[in-house]
Amino acid sequence: MTKKDIFEEIHQGFIPIDIKSIDTKNRITIGEKIIKKISRQNRVSQFQVFIGQDGDILLRPLTAIPSKEAWIYEKPELIGQIRQGLQEAKEGKAEKIENLEDL
């Protein structure tokens, strides 16, 4: 990840979800309600933190990718093929292969 990726300008709208208080150790908890809202598809393991010019704070949820799978994301064409295959399987277009050697 480059500095440009990390410090990109944010251009999206925000909606109010909840109000959180700072505890005695200067921490803010995210809370189960918010985690459920942002974690519908992937398990969130980290947050990238942005601070706006007006002091707004944006937490961008991140999901860790196991190192043995990271190579897939370095090849955009491969990601497209995998997503297409998953979509086809979801639509019932998958074929059962009896013998992998014949493939």
Image (tube, grey):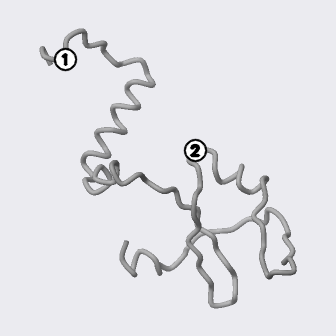
Which residue position is annotated with label 1?
100
**Label whose residue precedes the other's in the sequence (2 or 1):** 2
Q: Classify mark 2: helix, strand or loop.
A: loop
Residue 58 position within the rendered picture, expressed as x and y whole percent measured from the top left: 64, 74
Query: CA–CA distance between discs 2 and 1?
Result: 31 Å
Q: Amino acid at mark 2?
A: Gln
Q: Are marks 2 and 1 in contact (CB under 8 Å)?
A: no
Place residue 54 in its image quadrant: bottom right
Which residue position is annotated with label 2?
41
For disc 2, the neighbor class at 10 Å (few under 14, some 14 to 19, many from 20) is: few
Residue 57 position within the rendered picture, expressed as x and y whole percent measured from the top left: 67, 79
The residue positioned farthest toward the front in the image shown: 25
Which tag is nearer the camera, tag 2 or tag 1?
1
Image check: 61 left or right of 34? left
Instruction: Tell me if residue 73 comes above or below residue 94 in the rendering.
Output: below
Task: Give the residue drawn at x 26%, y 45%.
Answer: 78
Q: Amino acid at mark 1?
A: Leu
Residue 81 position within the rendered picture, expressed as x and y whole percent measured from the top left: 28, 39
Instruction: Tell me if residue 3 comes above or below residue 91 in the rendering.
Output: below
Place residue 53 in its image quadrant: bottom right
Quadrant for the C terminus, please. top left
**Number of numbered discs on residues:** 2
Image check: 62 left or right of 95? right
